[in-house]
Amino acid sequence: MPLIKKTEFVDIYLRKKRWKLILFLTAVLIVAASLYYTNILVNEIRKDERKNVEIWADAIHQKADLVNYTNHLFDQIKNEEHKRVSIVAEAQRRIIQASANEDLNFFLSIIGENNTIPVIVTDASGRIINSRNINTDGITFLEGPLKKEFSLYPPIVVTYYMNQKMFFYYKDSNIFEELKKVLDNLIKSFFSEVVINSASVPVIITDSTGKEIFDYGNIPDLKIKDPVWVARTLRSMAAQNTPIKVDLADTGIHYIYYQDSFLLTQLKYYPFVQFAVITIFLLIAYLLFSYARKSEQNQVWVGMAKETAHQLGTPLSSMVAWLELLKLKGLDEETVREIEKDVQRLETITDRFSKIGSTARLEPLNIVAVVHETVNYIRSRVSAKVNFTIQPGSHHEIRVPLNLHLFEWVIENLCKNAVDAMDGNGMVNIVITEDVDHIHLDVTDTGKGIPKSRFKTIFHPGFTSKKRGWGLGLTLSRRIIENYHNGRIFVKSSTLNKGTTFRIILKK
């Protein structure tokens, strides 16, 4: 079966990134197009809804004008009736004061033509002298409920012979009373139509001060009891629409505050709510797919690692047997010793791969000693032009929960990457420090450096700048540190053509 070339592996990684970007841009375009079209529909509905509100407000204005005009006519009728009573009273006075030869037909006709306005004439003591358009049979004095009924307006006083006085009491005519009932019903129906409107417009009707609530509609009862909410809502309504001023009979001046309907208010915010819902949905979908993808990657990693360990196991067992055979045949001891080291190294590598995907067993080990031993192994297998320094010295002891074989693998990867970055010529400095809770391990080289834009990318599988290699070393290192040791590994700092520092943070 042909092997996959490194360039093909990297191309797969790059194509994957490219497809993710294309899919993301496609999703953005679909969401943008959906929001744009939805916004157009919402604006059209909002315009229609706004027209309904404007038609309602205009109808309220016209109805208010009609009520005010009717009230004005009633005031005119009332004034005309008062004038008629004054004329009747004057005619009565002229009849009393007239001489024997004076023609009184005109004054009598004035009194006789009053067929609508109830009038009661009394003397100074309240004795009823005469009445018109009301039955006063059996009633001698104007008193009690009858006087109260005729006391709505002040009586007209007529002075005649020897300064004697007559009092003309009157009230609204029967026709006027009927018309007044019509006006009252008109006012009641006006307020009913305002607060119960087909446009579903929230309405608050106040008195002339704009503080006392007269009536309201399309507003919850609990909210209307909250004076703070009412004051804030009235200010909002006044800012949105100019209150309608209505001057009605008997009830005085009122202000009608209103605002856009609840549906119109919802439509204003609908695109934003839709955008938020779509964003949350996409975010959840992305997280779920990312989790599934990572789980799949983990399975692939574990499968590959265990299969590698299994494949190495068979030839490794044979090599151990051949090594024993070489010892029996008396092969040069130095050669046997070096072969034995490499076999042990292969056993360590096999053990490392077998531990991938398993629960790592951590033991409290001296991290300083582990780093020194690992670097000593690497030092003898790289260019002599590479100088390794470790601080503190091997005599120092700092104990940390570690899985020996896996942690050694991380140090090897970091050191090998440092050597490759320096082209086999430079300095690798490892510094181990500690605080109350954590251990910091810094690996610094004097190599080519890493651009800041790639600080996170270099840990992705398949990413490498070397001509050889698969770009898996740093990926494995991160998985070992983060998944098995609950620590962190990252690029602490890097300067192009000067060097890079990787930092590992482990809990004590």
Image (cartoon, rainbow, N blue to C red):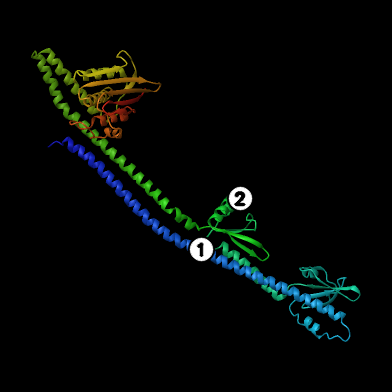
Amino acid type at mark 1: Glu
Q: Is 295 on the left or on the right of 1, as rendered?
A: right
Quarter of the C terminus within the rendering: top left
Q: Is 26 on the left or on the right of 326, as rendered?
A: right
Q: Are marks 2 and 1 in contact (CB under 8 Å)?
A: no
Instruction: Please tell me how crowded label 1 is: few (under 14), some (14-19), or many (20+) other residues with Cα within 10 Å.
Output: some
**What is the secondary structure assignment of the residue under circle 1?**
helix
Percent coordinates x, y for residue 214 in the rendering = 63, 58
Residue toward you, 196 or 39: 39
Quarter of the N terminus within the rendering: top left
Percent coordinates x, y for residue 483 in the rendering = 31, 30
The part of the image, by quadrant, that contains residue 14 is: top left
Cα distance in 3D space between marks 2 and 1: 28 Å
Q: Residue 54: which numbered mark, if any? A: 1
**What is the secondary structure assignment of the residue under circle 2?**
helix
Percent coordinates x, y for residue 185 in the rendering = 63, 69
Quickly name the residue at label 2: 227
Q: Residue furthest left?
A: 329
Tell me which residue sits at (78%, 81%) in the image.
110
The number of discs equals 2
Residue toward you, 104 or 457: 104
Amino acid type at mark 2: Pro
Please tell me which of labels 2 and 1 falls first in the chain: 1
Percent coordinates x, y for residue 496 in the rendering = 27, 29
Tell me which residue sits at (34%, 21%) in the image.
400
